[in-house]
Amino acid sequence: MDNIKKEDLIIKLGILFYFCSFLGYIYELILCYLDTGKIFSHGILFGPWLPIYGTGACFIMLIYKYRKNPALIFTLSFFITGLLEYLCGVILLKFFKIRLWDYTGYFLNINGHVCFLSAFCFGVGGILLTYLIYPLIKKIYEKVNKNVLKIILSLITLIFLGDIIATILK
């Protein structure tokens, strides 16, 4: 990523994680609506976030240093997020006996956990993240008081952890 202090990195990654978790939630709502004509929430958490998207975004930031090569960003994003989606699908099914998505029947799917189309969309997402979303987050970070950002991130994290606990207790 950038040459930044550890605290700055944590704040930027926190913003990125929650922002992309929320964007992923909106993305899934739109996809679901286009597919079924209905709006309903995906995932197992109660809040408007899908942490797999935030996690994928943070992993994509590991390749941010290659931003001068969009083809490489796309390709690495395709594989990194594809692997993340596959592993999450396997873990959810094996340990929690739930399947939140199923790509069975899609082109180049692997056990229904990932397919070419989803990985392609996440490759495009990696491009958007690298050239649009992360630069926007950097601008916000530079303009907003760091203490305010820490407080906001702390509150969101408490709500997120409460959501996880409520989900486990459910």
Image: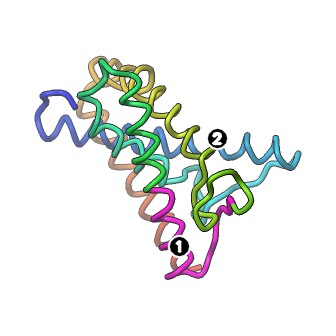
Q: What stretch of residues is rendered in magenta?
A: 84-103
Query: Which residue ends up furthest to the front in the rendered image?
Result: 108
Quadrant where the C terminus lies?
bottom right
25 displayed left or right of 35: left
Q: Which mark is residue 45?
A: none
Query: Which residue ends up furthest to the right in the rendered image?
Result: 37
Residue annotated with mark 2: 26
- Figure check: 165 above or below 139: below
Residue annotated with mark 1: 92
The amino acid marked with disc number 1 is: Leu
State the image coordinates of residue 49 (x, y, percent, origin top left): 55, 50
- Residue at 48% x, 26% y is 128
Q: Secondary structure at mark 1?
A: helix
**Which one is in front, 127 or 20?**
127
State the image coordinates of residue 26 (x, y, percent, origin top left): 64, 41
The amino acid marked with disc number 2 is: Ile
